[in-house]
Structures are given as C-alpha cells and as structure tokens.
Amino acid sequence: MNPILRHLGYGLAAVPALFLPFAYLIAVGWLCAYALPASYHGEEIPESGDRFLTVTRAGFHALVFQWPVYFVWVLVTRRLTPRLRLLWGGVMVIFSLVAIPWFLFAMWRRSERIELLRYIRRPSVRHYFAKGLREELPPVRHHLDLPDEYRQVRFKGPEDDVPPEFRIITAHNPEGVVVADEVNEVADAHLRAELERLEFEHFPVAGGSPDFSHIEPGYGIVCNRAEALLLARRFCQNGFYEVLGGRVYLFSVHEAHRPGEYVGRWRDLVDGEGPGTMEPTV
C-alpha cells in the first residue's frame, strides 16, 4: 500500500477515534466540576447546556458506530494470532473508549503484536498470549515509572573484591531533576555522613550513561533491601540498584513490592577506572 495513502487513512480514522476519550473527559469534567459539588451541598444540579449535550451525544453515537467496526477488525485481521485476537478483544470490550484509539495507533505503528504484551508482568500470562512471538517479545518492564536510561546504566567502580551483596544509591539529582553541582555535592556529603552514622560498609560507585557523558557519583552500600529503600526515599531518588551474586537488578522506590528488573552482570557493566577503586569504609 502506498505509504502516503496509508498515513492519510490512519490520520482520518484517528479523528473520530480520538473524539471518544475527548467526549468522555468532557462528561466526567462536567460531573466533577458542577454536578457532584451541587449534589454534595444539597443544591439543584445545574443545567448542562447545549454544548455539553452536543458533545456527549456525538460521543455516544461515535462509540456506537465505531465499536463494532473495530471489534470486527480485531477478529478478522491476519496480523494478530488467535490468542492476541482474544487479548485485544477483551481490551476492546472493557476499555472501548480508550482501546479504540489505542488499537488504531498500534496498527499504524505496526506494534499490534507486542503493544499489550509489554504491560503484562506475570510471566505465565505473558507467555500464553505471546505464543509464536518469541523473537518479537519485548522485555518485561516491572517498573514502568522508570525511564529506559536506568536500564542502560554503566558503572565506574571496583570490578573485583566487591561484597557478594550490596546496593547502589546516589544522592545526585533528586527525583531525576538535574540540579547545580554545588547542590549535588552537599547532598552527597549528607549521604556519606548518614552512611557513616549508620555504620554501613560502603565504597564509591558512580553510575552513568553507556558513554559516561552523564555520570552521577554514588556508593555501593552493604545493607539490606529495606534499608536501601529508606535511604533512596530519604534522598529523593526514583530508584536504586541491587548487586546480588554478580547480577545487577533495578528497583523503583515507588513500586518496591515489584521484583527487581535484571539489568546485567556486574562485570559487564562496570569500568574499573573511577571512584570505585577506593578502599571500602565503615
């Protein structure tokens, strides 16, 4: 198919598809801004107005027209396996207002085979729907609040003679916001003083991008996961790393109940030159 015609067709289909969540937000917005407050105070619910009725009525008609079309599309397209048809069909039934533009977007990007699978975290369910897609299956993302840069980390620290289990925490750039060097130095000093107060064995470890164009000094800390979580939260970090038996895992402070995401082996991710060559302290 001509690429120009393909993009044009999807662009035209996107207009009524995106109108569905827009109409839903308008309806919910009116309820939250006018109807619910009036009902709470025992007042008469104000009239919604012609514009509101026009938008909501048009949204209902657009849903009634589009839903059967997209549901049939899910069932007959050859780009989906039978199990993925079942998955998309279920999503279409439950989340129709959002699922319609989502499915259209996935078909346009040609990611319809893995679009939903990337959000399934239970391996057994994920593998059931991914039958026949082993080479296309995206990696599991346990911590969706963390950007991919956290998973592409490289370290500067000691390659050998490291504890069998430790966590890596930095105090730099709290909440992922880049701040001045002076602010980072003060935060690092506070973290180092806290580690000394708690008498945690620690040693310098810096984490950064693969080419080290961005790097944040931190510490490898011999502590348990709960203690690392408290430290990371206290210094306003989004996540921390755990090195267990030479394997590196990523944890989010906002989803601490989730299992860690495997990032790689310590020996493959660490560059021995750097601040981590200093002797451990207690």
Image (cartoon, rainbow, N blue to C red):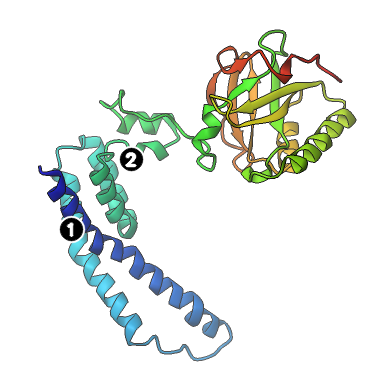
Q: In percent of the image, x 57 and y 82: which residue is there?
A: 40
Q: Amino acid at mark 1?
A: Pro
Q: Which mark is residue 115?
A: 2
Regarding residue 225, the answer to whether it shows in the image is no
Q: Is 2 positioned to the left or the right of 7 in the image?
A: left
Q: Amino acid at mark 2?
A: Glu
The x, y position of residue 227, in whole percent, is 75, 32
155 up-or-down from 252: above or below: above
Quarter-wise, where is residue 201 in the image? Answer: top right
The x, y position of residue 50, in whole percent, is 32, 87
Q: In percent of the image, x 79 and y 22: which residue is there?
A: 202
Q: Which mark is residue 68?
A: 1
90 up-or-down from 66: above or below: above
The x, y position of residue 90, in whole percent, is 29, 48
The x, y position of residue 282, in whole percent, is 86, 20
Q: Nearer the viewer, residue 233 or 133?
A: 233
Secondary structure state at the residue bearing disc 2: loop
Q: Quadrant of the N terminus?
A: top left
> Label 2 vs label 1: CA separation?
21 Å
Q: Look at discs 2 and 1 and give the one toward the viewer.
A: 2
